Image (spheres, helix red, strand yellow):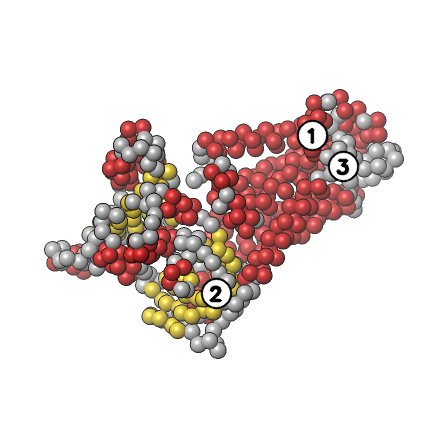
């Protein structure tokens, strides 16, 4: 989903976002007193108590509109610095996701919320900094006789000025590394610069202690934002401590499998690790990079007795991990426990895939390595179906789109087992190959097209060639289920963002059939 795409929940969010930021800016612009934020509404209503009417701030108010602007933007920045950390408290979100609040608040869009906070923070930093530059030069030009300070002295020798400029440098590093192209090519740069957050927040607290807004006799006029910034920072610090403790629990790497399509599978055992199908985890291999953690979807189910992940070897970290684990050789590598590299696991964490069993009809779409959450869910379906466990799910449509034919071997045994044991009335499997075919592949297809097994995938399900027509497919799914009262169709997708947008548009088109509007992505 695009950052600015409008949905009902996002519309409510944008309204709250803009109103809260605007109200806080106006409050900071107009009013200053030691009151806490709880009294904000009363303070705002009684506008006559604004900063320019405070007799103790007569000298400061003589600077003009820039001082009010810097004050308002500063209050909003404290608010954003608080909101910035909440969406990345993953353990807290995992707990909240299992509560009824998840129906109201989209906890799965935590990164979206984090980005919104970052964008707002960037804008109000620009406002705050420029307003302060005007303040400092105004002090030098108009108030030098009363405040004998040059602009450069306020910039670099005062507590507020020096900490503010260091924070600007940190923000520059963090924002430039967060660009999606930089993050994909140099993830290490993104990871390390983002962990400057600890220094940034310490400087933020010291920055507030610098207290630019003072009365003539030196008394500070703060907003007391420490009451909410410090507790949230402590909450996040506790979150990181919990992650570190959990990651240090015993983990035994038992097997490494090198799959066709340049993909590595890791299997490990961790008694303390309790998870659900479709969740994800973070992996750290100190021999590869001591401080780096990378997220991967869990491809196993709890019934299997181990935890597995499939990793596509496309980046610096993944390739080095494969070398350390001896994975650049075909087949299976069983680990010698005396020589096995240390592996640390943090998680599990929730995803929308946890809602899979809440629907009567589900559509699973995986593109390339994005099939991993679908694989875990399909394994879970097989175990439940085999055991005849009760479940609301009545129909599953599975679509797997690959560019390379070798990728179908990743979960070939799983799909073969599902074809043999689960009827098509419950599970439909559809595979698509979008890459170019060689002459040998074409000849193979022509010669073996009448065989029971598909010549490309060796599955009973016939392989489709070319890109799927998602609108036609999803309209077909919708049409097959129109007329059932209160029936919701869940569409679950994992893969590249452009295809996600295509499926989203197709879902909207399918919802127009009979005005059903019951297909959720």
Disc 3 target residue: 222
Q: Residue 36 vs residue 480: left or right?
A: right
Q: Are marks 3 and 2 in contact (CB under 8 Å)?
A: no
- Locate residue 9, reporting x and y percent: 47, 33
Q: Residue 308 vs residue 511: left or right?
A: right
Name the N-terminal-most of marks 1 and 3. 1
Identify the residue shown where x is 54% and y is 39%: 116
Name the N-terminal-most of marks 3 and 2. 3
Disc 2 target residue: 270
- Locate residue 99, reporting x and y percent: 50, 43
Per the model, the C-alpha gap separating discs 2 and 1 is: 49 Å
Quarter assignment of residue 227: top right
Per the model, the C-alpha gap separating discs 3 and 2 is: 49 Å
484 up-or-down from 182: above or below: above
The foreground one among 283 and 104 is: 104
Q: Are marks 2 and 1 in contact (CB under 8 Å)?
A: no
The foreground one among 230 and 25 is: 230
Identify the residue shown where x is 60% and y is 53%: 239
Residue 483 visible? The answer is: yes
Q: Are marks 1 and 3 in contact (CB under 8 Å)?
A: no
- Locate residue 132, reporting x and y percent: 72, 36
In the rendered view of the protein, which quadrant contains the C terminus? top left
Q: Secondary structure at mark 3?
A: loop
Disc 1 target residue: 40
Q: Secondary structure at mark 1?
A: helix
Per the model, the C-alpha gap separating discs 1 and 3 is: 14 Å
Q: Secondary structure at mark 2?
A: loop
In the rendered view of the protein, which quadrant contains the N terminus? top left
Q: Nearer the viewer, mark 2 or mark 1?
A: 2
Identify the residue shown where x is 67% and y is 39%: 78
Name the N-terminal-most of marks 2 and 1. 1
Residue 69 visible? The answer is: no
């Amino acid at each position: 989903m695009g950052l600015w795409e409008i949905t009902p929940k996002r519309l409510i969010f944008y309204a709250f976002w803009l109103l809260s930021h605007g109200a806080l800016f106006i409050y900071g612009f107009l009013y200053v007193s030691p009151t806490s934020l709880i009294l904000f509404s009363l303070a705002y209503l009684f506008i006559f108590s604004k900063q320019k009417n405070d007799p103790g701030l007569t000298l400061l108010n003589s600077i003009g509109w820039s001082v009010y602007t810097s004050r308002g933007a500063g209050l909003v920045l404290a608010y954003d610095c608080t909101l910035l950390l909440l969406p990345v408290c993953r353990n807290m979100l995992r707990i909240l996701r299992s509560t009824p609040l998840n129906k109201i608040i989209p906890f799965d869009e935590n990164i979206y919320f984090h980005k919104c906070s970052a964008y707002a923070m960037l804008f109000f930093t620009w406002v705050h900094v420029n307003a302060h530059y005007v303040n400092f030069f105004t002090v030098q030009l108009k108030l030098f006789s009363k405040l004998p300070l040059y602009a450069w002295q306020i910039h670099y020798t005062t507590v507020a000025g020096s900490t503010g400029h260091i924070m600007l440098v940190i923000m520059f590093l963090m924002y430039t590394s967060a660009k999606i192209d930089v993050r994909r090519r140099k993830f290490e740069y993104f990871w390390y610069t983002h962990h400057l957050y600890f220094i940034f927040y310490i400087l933020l607290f010291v920055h507030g202690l610098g207290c630019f807004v003072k009365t003539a006799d030196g008394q500070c006029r703060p907003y007391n934002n420490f009451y909410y910034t410090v507790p949230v920072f402590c909450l996040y610090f506790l979150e990181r401590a919990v992650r570190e403790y959990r990651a240090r629990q015993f983990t035994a790497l038992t097997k490494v499998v090198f799959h066709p399509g340049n993909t590595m599978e890791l299997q490990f055992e961790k008694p303390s690790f309790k998870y659900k199908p479709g969740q994800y985890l973070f992996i750290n291999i100190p021999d590869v990079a001591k401080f780096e953690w990378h997220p991967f979807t869990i491809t196993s189910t709890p019934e299997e007795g181990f935890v597995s992940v499939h990793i596509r070897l496309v980046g610096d970290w993944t390739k080095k991990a494969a070398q350390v684990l001896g994975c650049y050789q075909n087949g299976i590598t069983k680990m010698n426990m005396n020589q096995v590299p240390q592996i640390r696991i943090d998680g599990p964490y929730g995803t929308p895939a946890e809602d899979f069993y809440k629907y009567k009809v589900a559509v699973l779409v995986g593109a390339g390595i994005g099939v991993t959450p679908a694989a875990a869910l399909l394994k879970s379906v097989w175990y439940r179906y085999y055991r005849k466990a009760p479940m609301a799910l009545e129909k599953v449509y599975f679509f797997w789109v690959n560019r390379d034919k070798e990728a179908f071997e990743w979960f070939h045994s799983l799909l073969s087992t599902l074809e043999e044991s689960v009827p098509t009335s419950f599970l439909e499997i559809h595979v698509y190959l979008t890459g170019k075919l060689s002459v040998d592949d074409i000849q193979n297809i022509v010669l073996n097209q009448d065989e029971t097994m598909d010549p490309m995938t060796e599955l009973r399900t016939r392989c489709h060639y070319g890109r799927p027509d998602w609108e036609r497919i999803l309209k077909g799914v919708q049409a097959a289920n129109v007329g059932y009262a209160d029936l919701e169709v869940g569409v679950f997708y994992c893969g590249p963002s452009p295809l996600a947008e295509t499926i989203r548009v197709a879902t909207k088109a399918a919802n127009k059939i009979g005005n059903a509007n019951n297909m959720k992505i």
